[in-house]
Image: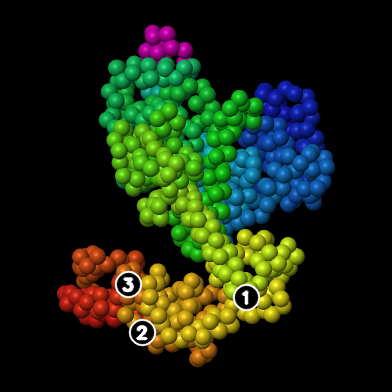
Amino acid sequence: MEKELSFDELLNKIKTYISDENQLNVIINAYDYAKFCHGDRLRKNKESYISHPINVAMILTTLNVDYITLAASLLHETINHGNSSKEIIEEKFGSEIANIVYSISRINRLSLNDDKESSAINLRKVLVGLCEDVRVLYIKLADRLHNMRTIWALEEDEIKSKIYETQNVLIPIAARLGINSIKSELENLCLKYSKPDVYHDIEEKLNNSKNELNATLEEMKNDLSEILSEHGIKFKIKGRVKSIHSIYEKMQNGHKWNEIYDILALRIIVEEISECYLAIGLIHAKYRPLPNRFKDYIAMPKGNMYQSLHTSIVGLDGYVFEVQVRTYEMDEVAEKGIASHWSYKEHSDGSVTNIMEEKLELFRNLIEQNVDNSSELDFENTVNTEFFGKMIYCVTPKGDVIELPLHSTPIDFAYRIHSHVGETTASAIVNNKIVPLDSELMDGDVVTIKTSSTAKPSREWLNFVKTSQAKNKIKAYFSKQDKEKYTLIGKDLLEKEIRKRKLSITEVLSSDHIDKLVKNLKLNDLDEIYLSIGSLRYTPTFIINSIFEDKKDVTDILIEKVNKNNKIDKHDYKSDIIVSGADNILISLANCCNPIKGDEIIGYITRGQGITIHKKDCPNIKDDCQRLIDVAWNEKSDNSYSCYLIITSENDKNVLVNIISLCSSKNISVDGIKTSQGLLETKYRLSIKIGSTSDLQNLINALKNLKNVKNVERYID
């Protein structure tokens, strides 16, 4: 067993960049308290337990984190494994350190339920959602790195679980935070313990050619150094053989060992941005660059603010070298992430801190906006697309870089700038050309958004925007509009009912009466009372009767209203459904039988949810005559309705293509297809939008005439 790292060694390393005596005393006191809490307890690898927080803090010193982070890292296990508490830590070290330690203790109690992707996504969103302070994530990543270094001491099942969690949760977060040094080592350790044979095979191959590779690297370094020195460029140059994990990924993409040429990498660090471009030019003048391998991440930084110039050249002995050129500050960001030591210093514009906070806030919003999403798969897809998927980088006319998911549109771009810009977008100019608002943006596009005080969002935007930020801002806009609309409707309905009863509006809506309603109905104010009427949660009669203690359920009011007039008056209704004796009533089509125009229908008065429209022969209609009301289709309506078909065919892969083509030719929207294949036949459950029963019958007849289709029937739950 290796010699344990001592606190004195850690303190000496800390003193290389922290000299303030008060800050150092906080760190020393944190160590003393952690050592007291952990006592003589041992880790599974037989080391003293205090060695773990010491190692975690040492890892964090390589990122030049502040004294608060170091103190919290030394204390990070004292709540879960040291019988301490947030209150005690706050009393001893203050609220800032206590909050970080408490967050870490909560995160460390989280674990995956199984090996499904949904578990990883769920843990990832909870983990990042817990982090009000990015330093919590830094400690968690350092904590996992040290645990991975000693993972051999765990049982096989524990090792498997830790590797899965690290690969699917922590490595992606490290990548998005830009902490390359931790990300790279975690990748190698995961490969080493998940696929030891593959890892050691690559390691052996590298060791066999180690001397040759190192000699080639050294010779190439000398050659490039000579070129740069001749032109008066001050620089530092580093050479390395690519990591085992990087080589493994290339082999996974189909490359054989003898086909991997670019395993040698050189990094040149200069003082000025202009020298980055000069250095690349000088290198290309002597060594042939590979086509399509030059990347300018200085002009177009990655989402984690990584900046560098990348190129691949054919160098000495025919080896392909990947060359990176960047400034010293860019190198700090690349290795330590954008929340490294300077982000805790005071900035005149708060730039680095704000960028980091934007990244976390983007993910928090993504989580909050999907709380009510019924599909976990949908949420996974959203997170993988918007936070961990391929990104593009577009530029404003002022040169600001906007990061967006692949396939984003000018509307996504506008909302990423500001919600007000999104809401007032009138047109978009991309690379000096006017483009439609649903155009797909490309990497490097220069985008100008033209706004107008009279422009408003369109519901059509929801059909093509890609980011959840844009979707939810658009939905929120229309939700607010609807709220205002229904509030005004409710106010008008209530005042009409008051006048109808020949009462005084001022007296009925006195402050005492409003307070009584707000308390009894658990609402906030008079506007919410109006809204509840406009959205048919309550009727004006119910509200007035509630004031005077003569309460009637909204269902009873509806039944009463309908019974007064059982004739259907087919005047100019805006709704698809005409309800007997009533207007402005909340109406929805039943999901069980999915009625479409032309079906014989009946209305069912629900409790608090308005009227649900069913087919007359729907088996789910309750035998309650008092709740059933006559309804009819509005003949002027030209909307489409959801419907399901079951198509049975012989096993033929062309059938599905023919089905889709036929629907497309008839302008029928296909929302979804579920396939169930047996030995002799295949069943397709088709979800479509269609206008009427006559349209449906025409479609069914046409489908039955398709080759190899055996049967088509409408499906009802």
| Number of numbered labels in the structure image | 3
- Label 1: element kind: loop
- Label 2: element kind: loop
Quickly name the residue at label 1.
Answer: 501
> In the image, is residue 264 above or below residue 378?
above
How is the structure coloured here?
rainbow
Q: Which mark lies nearer to you, 1 or 3?
A: 1
Three-letter residue code for mark 3: Lys
Q: Which mark lies nearer to you, 3 or 2?
A: 3
Q: Taking 310 as reference, is 629 left or right?
A: right
Q: Magenta segment: does it hold 230?
A: yes
- Kindly report the distance in space between the C-alpha atoms of the residues bearing marks 3 and 2: 17 Å
Q: Nearer the viewer, residue 388 or 517?
A: 517
Three-letter residue code for mark 2: Glu
Residue 360's image quarter? Answer: top right
Quickly name the residue at label 2.
Answer: 600
Badge 3: few (under 14), some or many (20 or more) residues near its Cα, within 10 Å?
few
Residue 74's image quarter? Answer: top right
Three-letter residue code for mark 1: Arg
Badge 1: few (under 14), some or many (20 or more) residues near its Cα, within 10 Å?
few
Q: Position of residue 634 (x, y in %)?
A: 36, 75
Q: Taking 75 as reference, is 191 left or right?
A: left
- Label 3: element kind: loop
- Kindly report the distance in space between the C-alpha atoms of the residues bearing marks 1 and 3: 35 Å
Q: Position of residue 90 (x, y in %)?
A: 79, 43
Q: Nearer the viewer, residue 72 or 617?
A: 617
Quickly name the residue at label 3.
Answer: 636
Q: Earlier in the sequence, mark 3 or mark 2?
A: 2
Residue stretch rendered in magenta on the structure: 223-235
Q: Magenta segment: does it hold 551?
A: no
